[in-house]
Image (spheres, rainbow, N blue to C red):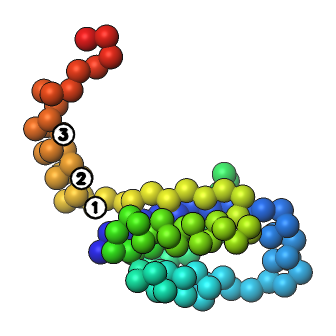
């Protein structure tokens, strides 16, 4: 099943609510992933440009996007990015296809 990483950042209001009522968000994220037919692989908190990340297995990009849109529509997030992850075998497939089509591409001004 394809994997996706979702980077998220909470709003100031959400952080305020979490300070007042701390809790583990893992169950809520897992429930959303499973309701869409996916699986939560990991939830991590981090410092920097985002507050955390989720690694999600989903049947396809549309399913991963549905989980992301659902989370974002709650109003608790100020920023959200969803990216599909590729393993080494998938990268080799991409590179092989790129080699096949490289001759058809013309850069701007060429």
Secondary structure under the numbered disc 1 in the rendered image: loop
Q: Are marks 2 and 3 in contact (CB under 8 Å)?
A: no
Q: Residue 106: x and y, percent?
A: 23, 21
Q: Is 63 above or below relative to 110?
A: below
**x 31%, y 59%: residue:** 86
Circle nearer the N terminus (1, 3): 1
Q: Nearer the viewer, mark 1 or mark 3?
A: 3
Secondary structure under the numbered disc 3 in the rendered image: helix
Q: Residue 73: x and y, percent?
A: 66, 68
Q: Are marks 2 and 1 in contact (CB under 8 Å)?
A: yes
Instruction: Say whether residue 53 is visible.
Output: no
Residue holding disc 3: 98
Q: Nearer the viewer, mark 2 or mark 3?
A: 3
Residue holding disc 1: 87
Residue holding disc 2: 91
* Distance from the alpha carbon under mark 1 to that under mark 3: 16 Å
* Distance from the alpha carbon under mark 2 to that under mark 3: 10 Å
**x 45%, y 57%: residue:** 83
């Amino acid at each position: 099943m394809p994997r996706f990483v979702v980077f998220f950042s909470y709003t100031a209001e959400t952080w305020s609510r979490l300070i007042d009522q701390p809790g583990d968000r893992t169950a809520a994220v897992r429930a959303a992933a499973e309701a869409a037919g996916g699986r939560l692989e990991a939830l991590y908190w981090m410092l920097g440009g985002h507050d955390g990340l989720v690694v999600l297995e989903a049947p396809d990009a549309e399913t991963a996007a549905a989980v992301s849109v659902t989370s974002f529509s709650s109003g608790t997030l100020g920023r959200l990015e969803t990216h599909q992850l590729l393993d080494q075998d998938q990268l080799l497939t991409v590179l092989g296809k790129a080699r096949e089509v490289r001759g058809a591409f013309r850069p701007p001004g060429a």
